[in-house]
Image: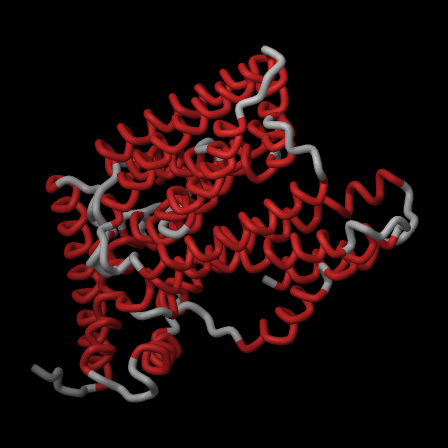
Amino acid sequence: MLIKVCSWVLHCCTFDTWLWYPVVLSIRLLPDWGIRLPKGMYLLMFRYGTDSDKERAVLTSLFSVSHFIGQITAAGICFATNGISSDWGWRIPSLLQIAPPMIQLCFVFFVPESPRWLVARDRSKEALETLVKFHAEGKESDFVKAEMAQIQSTLRIEMQTTKRSWLDLGATAGMRRRLLTTCMLGLFTQWSGSTLISYYLGDLLQIIGKNSSHFKQTINVSLACWSLVCSFAASMLVRRFKRRHMYLACTASLLICFSSYTISMERTITAKENGGSNDAAGAASIFLLFAYSPCYCLALNTVTYTYLVEIWPYAERSRGIAIFQLFARCAEFFTTFANPIGLKSISWRYFIVYCCILAYEVVFVYFFFPETSGKTLEEATFLFEDEKSLAAETILAVENSTATELMSRDSLERRQAGSGTKPST
């Protein structure tokens, strides 16, 4: 998190100055690198480590909702500075980016460590104190003790059956299924039309004849506000509906919405090419842009990070999330350059590609996404494993624990025999 804060501060302090272009470009790359690392490796694991099982899903979903607060703020600032003709029209938004990292810098040192991270490093006492503070309001209870015992036993099994390397991601059938699900989820978040609408909203509006800069920015701010409402509402539904059902509803509704959007754009562009206009189809396309937000926020925006942490065991969780980030960023990079080429080359037919991808997503979710709701992190760990693999891991863990116990007892008896003390029974 400190890396993220420092990279953003450096970016904001230097981006506004007159520097050599390669230096400015290099500095511009720092914030994105500084965001992806803590977002993928730390923030999610911390969020899941300190929240109780009852609150975890909702709070982690709200983590994604906060993105739209920043988007609304940025869109509003750019909208307000749009009329400034001098360099301050772009300098003000650039300089104001320093505010969020400075706020984080003030509070980052008060953030506690994850209990599971502490247990994995033999700091169980500190882990128990964290659990008592966040899960039992500062009072020790049987629930916290049971939770602590479950964390310790599960981590012991995971640590004894893994080599803690990247090769573990494909070691078993269950791990390979996790890896496939994670890779596809990374692609789905970017190849469901979100990058097209987010990055090329102005081009989409220009296609239907809306060329006014004021109108485009108005739609941009309105979409950001609407997405915040939809994302917050979806976060409140996480505890009421199962993860798998939310993903199925999300992908199916996206397919219907994007198919309708493709038809409306086809009608609009065809009428434009024939020298006329189709105002009804143009209005429908704008409406469907707003209809897209609740469909996407239903799962791909709010549930994704919750689902990722639930399907990966602790020992491989950081690597699993890193794989997700890698595929998501690669998919985002690809679509960022492919979208303008596709729109220019094949016009509205390019939207059919997204419709095909969304149809594939529905099928993949139906056959490959397991249900994780209503389970603790330790229980969800074993969803991908078959009975044979679970039995082998359990036997290995028991054998290792028994061997460790016998060695400790034998060592104690030898020390007692050497000192002339009678061994206790």
Q: Nearer the viewer, residue 180 or 119?
A: 180
Quadrant in which residue 402 is drawn: bottom left
Q: Is residue 269 above or below residue 290?
A: above
Residue 145, above or below 138: above
Q: Quadrant of residue 339?
A: top right
Q: Position of residue 295 (x, y in %)?
A: 38, 42
Side (left or right) of 150 relative to 200: left
Give x and y (percent) for residue 347: 56, 17
In which quadrant of the rendered view does residue 131 lie? bottom left
Query: Is residue 259 visible in this depiction of the protein?
Result: yes
Residue 223 place in picture, x, y as percent:
54, 48
Whole-percent x and y of residue 254? 37, 35
Q: Quadrant of the N terminus?
A: bottom right
Residue lying at 40% horizontally and 64% vertically, measured from the top left: 117
Q: Is residue 316 visible?
A: no
| Residue in front for this viewpoint, 292 or 322 | 292
Asked whether, in this view, residue 201 is left or right of residue 325, the answer is right
Find the residue positioned furthest to the top: 274
Identify the residue shown where x is 81% and y is 51%. Answer: 83
User: In this rendering, would 313 be left or right of 194?
Assistant: left
Q: Quadrant of the C terminus?
A: bottom left
Q: Nearer the viewer, residue 58 or 277?
A: 277
Colour scheme in use: secondary structure
Count of numbered circles on the image? 0
Please state if 333 lies on the left or on the right of 425 as rendered.
right
Which residue does the image show at 26% across and 28% down from the upper left? Answer: 363
Above or below, 348 relative to 218? above
